[in-house]
Image (cartoon, rainbow, N blue to C red):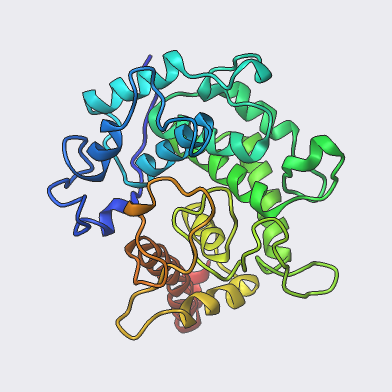
């Protein structure tokens, strides 16, 4: 039986005027950014040359970019590209030649792989089970857990959350997955999305050397408050007081022309020429910011309605 694929909310819906998405309405694979990236796939299913970045990196983040573009995953050309990935690409002998859509060992990577499998119809229940088994006591995940860490990482947690949510959206809700996600939501919300639980101070990113109030596209494995808010929106979480400070950061970053800037480009970003220039207005960041503010505003409208008519809250 073919996997059940549900509608998605592609970033491409706000990006049609980009020079490489013109003429690519509907997320088709015949023109635009999608075609450009598909053209770069090798016959063995890989992207890149293995020199500028390892093959696993260019494979993973090219597919993430294709998903973010809202590419039509049912088109013959896209299906052929995904078939080449499924049939040819593994994570190498160091990981038992695990097939690409079965993931490897680090949850930050496996969360991304799970989301890709959900989008492109390559289901892996084994990968879901592995991620659920790796959830830490405080609610999140950490790629360093295998080396003894018992505290979760914002970076790893957001990658896994996005993967688990994509899986449920594509294939249907599962109580074990929903419960795990809700536990992880509390991990983020208790910390106001960017503060230490113990002291309340703003967390300094020691790995990426970037502030979590700087917005990047593509984010790769990096966490930032806009990425977290956009996830919560997609997950249907009702915003409460714990997101107010993060939402205020997004609102304050809006430029006079109504757009948001690309603040930072992370190291080893692939296809950076498609992502926009640092310091310039960025349609990808703008879309995510607008979605978040609309999500938050709906809470205010619901609250106002309930105040006018208490029956509205019942």
Location of residue 184 in the rendering, given as x and y in whole percent from the top left corner: 69, 50
Q: Farthest residue in the bottom direction?
A: 256
Q: Farthest residue in the left direction?
A: 23
Q: How many marks?
A: 0
Q: Residue at x 58, y 71 (%)?
A: 213
Quarter occupied by residue 145: top right
Location of residue 55 in the rendering, given as x and y in whole percent from the top left corner: 50, 30
Vertical comparison of 219 with 113: above or below: below
Q: Nearer the viewer, residue 90 or 152?
A: 90
Vertical comparison of 179 with 188: above or below: above
Q: Image check: 267 left or right of 135?
A: left
Q: Image check: 21 left or right of 314?
A: left
Q: Residue at x 73, y 68 (%)?
A: 203
Q: Residue at x 12, y 48 (%)?
A: 23
Q: Residue at x 37, y 46 (%)?
A: 271
Q: Quadrant of the N terminus?
A: top left
Q: Nearer the viewer, residue 229 or 2?
A: 229
Vertical comparison of 10 with 92: above or below: below
Q: Nearer the viewer, residue 299 or 235?
A: 235
Vertical comparison of 211 with 85: above or below: below
Location of residue 24 in the rendering, given as x and y in whole percent from the top left corner: 17, 45
Location of residue 4 in the rendering, given as x and y in whole percent from the top left corner: 38, 27
Q: Image check: 277 left or right of 169?
A: left
């Amino acid at each position: 039986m073919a996997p059940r694929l549900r509608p998605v909310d592609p970033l491409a819906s706000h990006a049609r005027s980009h020079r490489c998405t013109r003429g690519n309405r509907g997320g088709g694979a015949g023109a635009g950014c999608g075609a450009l990236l598909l053209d770069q796939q090798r016959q063995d299913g890989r992207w890149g040359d293995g020199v500028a970045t390892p093959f696993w990196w260019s494979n993973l983040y090219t597919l993430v970019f294709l998903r973010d573009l809202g590419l039509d995953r049912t088109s013959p050309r896209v299906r052929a590209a995904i078939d080449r990935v499924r049939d040819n690409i593994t994570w190498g002998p160091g990981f038992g030649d695990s097939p690409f859509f079965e993931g490897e060992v680090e949850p930050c990577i496996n969360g991304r792989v799970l989301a890709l499998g959900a989008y492109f119809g390559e289901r892996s229940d084994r990968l879901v089970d592995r991620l659920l088994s790796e959830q830490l006591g405080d609610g999140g995940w950490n790629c360093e857990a295998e080396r003894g860490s018992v505290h979760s990482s914002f970076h790893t947690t957001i990658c896994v959350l996005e993967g688990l949510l994509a899986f449920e959206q594509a294939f249907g809700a599962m109580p074990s997955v929903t419960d795990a996600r809700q536990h992880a939501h509390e991990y983020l919300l208790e910390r106001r999305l960017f503060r230490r639980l113990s002291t309340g101070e703003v967390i300094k990113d020691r790995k990426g050397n970037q502030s979590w109030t700087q917005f990047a596209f593509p984010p790769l494995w990096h966490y930032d408050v806009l990425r977290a808010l956009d996830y919560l929106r997609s997950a249907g979480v009702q915003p409460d007081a714990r997101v107010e400070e993060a939402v205020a950061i997004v609102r304050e970053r809006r430029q006079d022309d109504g757009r948001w800037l690309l603040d930072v480009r992370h190291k080893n970003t692939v296809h950076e020429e498609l992502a926009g220039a640092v310091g310039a207005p960025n349609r990808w960041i703008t879309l995510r910011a607008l979605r978040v503010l609309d999500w938050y505003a709906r809470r205010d409208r619901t609250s106002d309605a309930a105040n006018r008519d208490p029956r509205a809250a019942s």
